[in-house]
Amino acid sequence: MWAIQRRLGDGFGAFALSLAIGGQFAALPLCAQATDGSPPPQGAAAGTEAPAIRLNTVGYLPGRPMAASVAGATGAFQIRRLSDGAIVWEGELSPLRQNLDTAEELSIADFSALGFPPEGDYELIVADSGERVQFRIDDDLYREPFLLATRAMYLWRCGAPVSGDHDGAHFEHGPCHLEDAFLDFVGGGNNRRECVGGWHDAGDYNKYVVNAGATVGVMFRAWQDFGPAIEQVELNIPPADPPLPEFLAELKWELDWLLTMQADNGSVYHKVSAQNFGGMIPSDQDANPRYLVPWSSAATADFTAMMAQAARVFAPHNAEYAAKCQAAAERSQAFLMAHPEEHAADQTGFQTGGYHAPDADDRLWAVAELWETTGDETLLADLEKRIEASPSVDADWDWPNLKNLGLLTYLFSERQGRNPELVERVRKSLLRTADEIVATAATHGYARPLGTKYSWGCNGTVARQSLVLHAAYRLTDDEAYRNAILDGLNHLLGRNYFGRSFVTGLGERPPLHPHDRQSEGDAVDAPWPGYLVGGANPNATDWSDRMEDYRTNEIAINWNGALIYALASQLNPAPQ
Ligand SMILES: [Ca+2]
Ligand SMILES: [Ca+2]
Ligand SMILES: [Zn+2]
């Protein structure tokens, strides 16, 4: 990702206020302007081309809520089945209400009452204007999007050739960055240490441990929560040796690289990076020298957490690898305990992504995962002290703050010895936060679960909210939480101001010009498929499908990891 420096609490949407105002969607941003004072990108005019009917362009799951937002229309609407032309539903649009963050009058077309109609293609028709938009109803709706978003991780692989086809286009690159990485900035002179592999981070080709944490942590959570459904989806990626479930094979590609980032003393280098962002060229033509960047405590803690997760998840599949990951986690945890102070990486000489944020959350997550893996009582005592200091589950979180991952591991642990009072505090906080997310979606004109908060990568945050929502569903069996996950997916796939899908190669009118070196640098017109772009920032209407607009139209592993979790949560369970 570009030189993102978002810190805790300074997101543009951090001070948005939601109010229940009669006749209006509660959406009143108090802090809606970019703090850098820059004007919105010109391409934001894309919104003017949006169809009046804005819905999930991938479709809807039978038996679940189905609704579209319609700009400036009232009166009757119909749902027509395309196969035989039958009108299967007639209803009334809701009264128009003002949606404040997009400054529009919106009505809602709710056709949830369709229930379980035959699988297939339908269209929503607004009677007065005659405008119509097609959509699909299918109980296996999210298999293809899940496949696409997960294969996008494979296409991000560095250090190896990758290739794939989508919609008649072929995408490939040769082995890249085989000289990763030089030791000049970590006291090793102009010599190399083998750090080949892993995923490129985003629209750039550098590799950052902290953002790997946000990605791998969420993808492991997806495996833990939805493994059996995930395993039913054939990813068609290169097999691991010895064999692994494909989803874990893809994670192992990143973990193998991460293992090279641990220094002998247990600290972990912050990133592998060129000194500056390179040109918009394919990765296999990028010859800029790349360097290891000095260690940070946040990277070391995230590494510890990921390796501890890996030790558990891989144990049934590859015991030797699991043991290697556990040993690496314990080595880094020992280093962290000997160095309890916050330590930022010295990034002097580098203009690339900083990924610097406080490490208390990362340390909490590390201790949570290593305790869950080992059952060590000292770790549990340390963990509970950290949770006591900060027990609240967050609604809006990303790579700077990974505390939620640790809290979820603690909350759902089956290990003995937890303080029941503290468990209850975390449980209550989680449900409170999930309720808040559900309420926020219900009061927004596009049912956006993040409400009126718009910041760098907020599409990823919308997807990431699904972790807390699914956790609340696990605790209560209340469908409202799972429905709010669908609200998020609906928003990302077209029920938004632009009436467009935010994922390349998926749904209707997806981004064609993401800020992505691979897409921009190759000779294929279509962008590389399966990538969630960052989304509107700093205001609801500020997104443009322009390559130059890295602030809203870049891609990044942490956003895709979150999308993968949200999609996995809606996979059709395998037939028994
Ligand atoms: Ca942090
Ligand atoms: Ca291209
Ligand atoms: Zn590469």
Image (tube, rainbow, N blue to C red):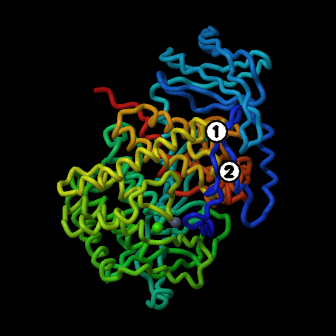
Q: Which residue is mark 2?
A: 536
Mark 1 residue CB less than 8 A from any atom of ligand 1: no
**Front residue of this view, candidates 158 and 435:** 435
Residue sitting at x 33%, y 77%: 336
Task: Give the crowd class for mark 2: few <14, some 14-19, many >=20 residues within 10 Å.
Answer: many
Residue 415 location (% of width, % of height): 20, 54
Query: How many angstroms separate mark 2 from mark 1 (CA)?
Result: 23 Å
Quarter-wise, where is residue 376 in the image? bottom left
461 with respect to 42 (left or right): left
Residue sitting at x 47%, y 52%: 561
**Front residue of this view, candidates 513 and 336:** 336
Q: Which residue is mark 1?
A: 20
Residue sitting at x 61%, y 51%: 533
Is residue 489 shown above or below 61? below
Q: Amino acid at mark 2?
A: Ala
Residue 497 is labelled as none
**Do callouts 2 and 1 mark residues in contact (Cβ within 8 Å)?**
no
